Amino acid sequence: MPKSERFQQPTLRQLELLLALVSSDGIAGAGAKLGMTPSATSHALRALEDALGVQLVERNQSGLSLTYAGEQVLPHVRDVFASLQLVTATARAGAELKTGLIRVGSFGASASLHALPALLQQFRTRYPGVSVIVTERPDEETSQDLIERRIELAAVTLPKPDFETITLAVDELVAVLPEDHELATQAEVQLADITRFPFIMTRAGSQKLIQRLFARHNCRPRIAHELLQIMSILEYVSRGEGVSILARLAVPDAYPGVRYVPLLPQTRRSIGLACLGENKLSPAAKALWQEAKRFSVASY
């Protein structure tokens, strides 16, 4: 046997023949079960033994039997076909959306608290066997996770021209003030008035939007604190440490000692679900994408 032909990977057809041999009277009978001619069966068996570099079958007057090597190989061959059946069953279940796992990114509270929950509730009602895992990271990191395929879908701020997107919600910036603050009684607060007081800057998802807002209107806030957690900002505001600007969907409906007041100029942002391309999604993720389309239409 040429050295270059030894220890090659056997084909599934060859392994299937070995399984058939165990329950057949002879080589020809095993081949017939697989629709193979006697000549093709003998050739396939020789090719299998050549590939593995060992004799698997004893040919004798009473028929055939497995060699010691054949007996050792047989359980693993059965495992191969059992695994193939499991692969097929798992794939079919996923295609029918009886099971599945979707990893979804989220840029922060506005998405995690408001844009995603209603959508995911609808999706779970329709596909209860599919698990959805949401991971919060800053908007830029969430977008990078999409690009690097660590997640299939992400709630992001729009626009995102590099992705396919579906709008889920529209958010608005509001002034966040102590309830006894002199601006808290106004129906609307001018951005320029905010700069008169110590300012608490968020380091969460809306930070860049707020920074651009100040820059666009040539306003410079008097930053007293920079805080990551929304609840920390609200607590600092309630204690008179300063005023802030936050996205309305990121904050609770009410917080003790705090008042939300519409901000002028009005500044909105859209929140959307993004993916690299609908045709690149797994069956489960594609189903969530389609649910998001229905959700978007129903919301507007």
Image (cartoon, helix red, strand yellow):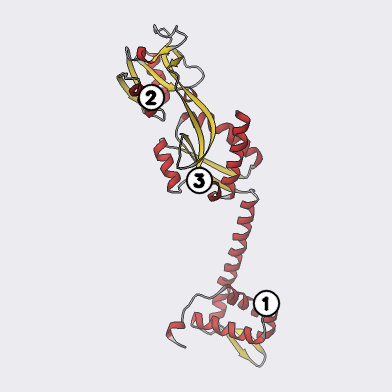
First along the sequence among labels 2 and 3 = 3
- Say if 26 sits above or below 122 in the image: below
- Residue 266 in percent (x, y) is at 45, 19
Amino acid of disc 3: Glu
For the residues labelled 2 and 3, the Cα–Cα distance comes to: 28 Å
Q: Is residue 22 left or right of residue 239?
A: right
| Mark in front: 2 vs 1 | 2
Determine the secondary structure under disc 2: helix
Q: Is residue 24 left or right of residue 279?
A: right
Q: Which residue is mark 3?
A: 152
For the residues labelled 1 and 3, the Cα–Cα distance comes to: 41 Å
Determine the secondary structure under disc 3: loop
**CA neighbours of label 3 inside 10 A, class few (<14), some (14 to 19), many (20+):** many
First along the sequence among labels 2 and 1 = 1
Is residue 32 or residue 145 the one in the foreground? 145
**CA neighbours of label 1 inside 10 A, class few (<14), some (14 to 19), many (20+):** few
Is residue 153 or residue 56 the one in the foreground? 153
Give me the residue at 58% from left, 48% from top: 100
Q: Residue extending furthest bottom?
A: 61
